[in-house]
Amino acid sequence: MVKYVLLALSLTLTACQHKPETSLYQRLGGESGVEHIVDGILYGIEHDQSIVHHFADTDIPRFRRLLIEQFCELSGGPCKYSGVSMQESHTGFQITQAHFDALVNHLITAMQQQKVSVEAQNELLAILAPMYKDVVYR
Amino acid sequence: MKKVLAALGFLLVSPYLMAGSKVIATGGATTIEGNSGGGIVPWATINGYSSSDEWSVNSFAGRVGVDDFTLDSLGVGASFNNQWELSFARQKFALDTIGGELRQDVLGVKYKVAGELLYTGLPQISIGAQFKKNRDFALPSAVGAGDDSGYEVYVAATKVFFDAIAGRNLLLNATIRSTDAHQTGLLGFGGEGVSRKLMFESSAVLLLNYNLALGTEFKQKPNQLGFADEQHWRDLFAAWFINKNASVVLGYVDLGDIAGLSDQTGFYLSLEGTW
């Protein structure tokens, strides 16, 4: 019984799995899509008492530009991230797991609001999640 | 049960009441024994949504209804720092055909040792212990169980793989449990010729989106009580994480033979509230 249901499930999922030919960057909505996602994250940070203090001395326009560059480059878009490494930019800020989780939640909310597909969301999360080790408790 | 439903109803209209920072669904569901996991297998996940330096509490009510038996579980739990989990569950196993009932309490503790479910290449790894105590021991004693209480220790490794199948995230879990319990302790512990055994349990869960998941589990069982065969357990389930305060799990279970009654299959339903 269980085996057949699993088989049916995997067949169904395989059937709707067609590798998208467009880049993740395009599926995130291209230039304007990535900008909207980053703006959504900034909005989330601004209204989150638990993490907003980390950005008290941040040059927000510059931070926004770098984040857009980074998401663009990581998702296969035509950009080059010009900032310093994740490790370098987060060392000394005492960022905790709760802070990191909060940021992930803001990213998810921003992508949901932009109606990014679940597949594209997961693909971006897969790229960003491993940055945890360079960001938290540095 | 009514109180639990009323509480859940309240939660549905008051979203994000004191929820912790963890991403939705990453606290897992709550097993019939009260710890974070699927339905029958404990995972390395820590229950609720408490991230670093945060607290959370949870409560659940579950029912397994198979041909000749009904298992009701009720419990509460508390978690801290996404590292410690304490849980207490009270179980009532009704012998619908045979008559009578077997009640058991389960006290559990879990500690995350390494890894992060979502963020590290290493799976999240936790160790846990469960102390179980029968509140009805006449029947277990009569069929050969030696003790009305026992403990189990387990180690679990759990990881979420992003974008794994058809763009969906996949959670895989493996658990090894040391036990001398019969039918998870409902039929007592130890006895003549019974030794402590290592059992393997596993879960695979496909997260369709942030709120819905489909999963399957396997739980190896030791079969050491002479009077009747005990078999491995399996289940299939759908979990709905309505928000960070409420979740529902509905499943199909196959518990094999129990106390001489064969092919015990049926449903599983569990409601959980998290604060």
Image (spheres, coloured by chain):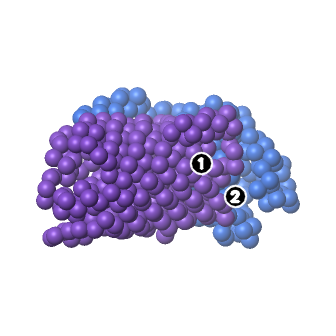
Chain colours: A blue, B purple
- On the picture, is B236 further left or further right than A120? left
Numbered disc 1: secondary structure: strand
Q: What's the residue at 59%, 48% (across, down)?
A: B274
Vertical comparison of B270 with B133: above or below: above
Q: Which residue is mark 1?
A: B274
Q: Is residue A121 visible?
A: no
* Label 1 and label 2 in one chain: no
In terms of image quadrants, where is residue A57?
bottom right
Chain letter of disc 1?
A: B
Q: What's the residue at 41%, 58% (across, down)?
A: B105
Say which amino acid is labelled 2: His
Numbered disc 2: secondary structure: helix
Q: Nearer the viewer, residue B75 or B205?
A: B75
In terms of image quadrants, where is residue A8?
top left
Q: What's the residue at 33%, 57% (across, down)?
A: B136
Vertical comparison of B185 with A75: above or below: below
Q: Residue B58 location, x and y as percent?
A: 57, 51
Say which amino acid is labelled 1: Thr
Q: What's the residue at 67%, 70% (across, down)?
A: A138
